[in-house]
Image: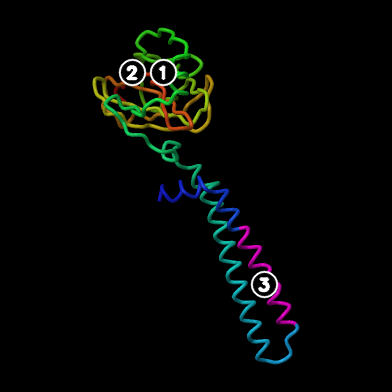
């Protein structure tokens, strides 16, 4: 189902154009059949013309239903899916982030990215681009938590934040977003289903070509709920 939604979302313009052309052609045939029906004198001619009218109406209605279905896929269903599902998912490596070979553009971008400002307990965080500002490193979390920070890189695609037990690379995606966030709320995180203990929380930001910069990782502790 995700593949179908993704296909119709990515090719929405082409589908709309094809449907529009089809509806214009059918509408023209419907008008001709209707005129033929009105100008018919004999019963057999009227019957044949009426069949043409009915057929054209049925095809037009079918195309209109397809138009509405595309609108639902593109405007409603696609917006309910995590952004990571709407973009091609790169192969994950040992570190848990995409192992794509960096394009020259991405390599240049990484080289020109300012050196991360040291944040005690945090790794890879870049203020103004990829950073988690809340919770703070080492903070104990309980219940519903607001994740705040910045996800803003050139050619922004989407971001996601993930969690893994401390010392593990078994990352689980909590939530993803498709909008740039600058010093604001990235989303919510319910910690109630996690066993109390030490965890790593990371923010991964990916560009519109599916390539991710190194993530911002902070340690947190989940307390008894």
Q: In the structure shown, which secondary structural element does the residue marked by tag 2 occupy?
A: strand
Instruction: Please give the range of residues in magenta.
Output: 20-38
Q: Nearer the viewer, residue 21 or 1?
A: 21
- Residue 50 quadrant: bottom right
- Could you say which quadrant of the image residue 30 lies in? bottom right
Q: Does the magenta stretch include residue 35?
A: yes
Position of 187 compared to 97: left or right? right
Q: Secondary structure beneath disc 1?
A: loop
Q: How far apart are marks 1 and 2 (CA)?
A: 8 Å
Q: Name the residue under label 1.
A: 135
- Please state the horizontal and vertical placement of residue 89, each as a whole percent of the image: 38, 37
Badges 1 and 2: C-beta atoms under 8 Å apart? yes
Q: In this view, does 91 lie above or below 140?
A: below
Name the residue located 44 percent from the left edge and 14 percent from the top edge.
Answer: 111
Query: In this figure, which residue is indicated by the disc labeled 3?
Result: 30
Q: How crowded is mark 2: few (under 14 residues within 10 Å), some or many (20 or more)?
A: many
In the drawing, does residue 138 fall left or right of residue 130? left
Residue at the outermost left position: 167
- For image coordinates 48% across by 42% down, the residue present is 80
Q: Nearer the viewer, mark 3 or mark 2?
A: 3
Q: Residue extending furthest front?
A: 104
- Location of residue 154 in the rendering, given as x and y in whole percent from the top left corner: 52, 23
| First in residue order: circle 3 vs circle 2 | 3
Can you tell which of label 3 and label 1 is closer to the viewer?
A: 3
The answer to whether residue 119 is above or below residue 11 is above
Locate the C terminus and report the quarter of the image it occupies.
top left
Return the residue at label 2: 220
């Amino acid at each position: 189902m995700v593949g179908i939604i993704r296909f119709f979302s990515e090719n929405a313009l082409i589908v709309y154009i094809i449907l529009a052309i089809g509806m214009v052609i059918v509408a023209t045939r419907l008008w001709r059949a209707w005129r033929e029906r009105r100008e018919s004198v004999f019963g057999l001619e009227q019957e044949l013309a009426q069949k043409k009218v009915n057929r054209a109406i049925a095809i037009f209605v079918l195309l209109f239903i397809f138009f509405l279905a595309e609108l639902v896929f593109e405007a409603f269903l696609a917006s309910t899916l995590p952004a990571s599902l709407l973009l091609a998912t790169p192969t994950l490596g040992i570190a848990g982030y995409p192992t794509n070979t960096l394009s020259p553009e991405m390599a240049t971008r990484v080289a020109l990215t300012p050196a991360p400002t040291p944040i005690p307990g945090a790794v890879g965080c870049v203020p103004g681009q990829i950073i988690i500002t809340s919770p703070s490193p080492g903070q104990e979390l309980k219940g519903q938590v607001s994740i705040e920070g910045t996800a803003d890189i050139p050619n922004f695609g989407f971001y996601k934040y993930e969690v893994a037990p401390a010392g593990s690379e078994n990352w689980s995606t909590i939530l993803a977003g498709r909008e740039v966030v600058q010093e604001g709320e990235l989303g919510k995180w319910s910690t109630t289903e996690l066993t109390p203990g030490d965890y790593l929380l990371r923010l991964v930001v990916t560009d519109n070509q599916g390539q991710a910069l190194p993530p911002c990782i902070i340690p947190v502790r989940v307390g008894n709920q």
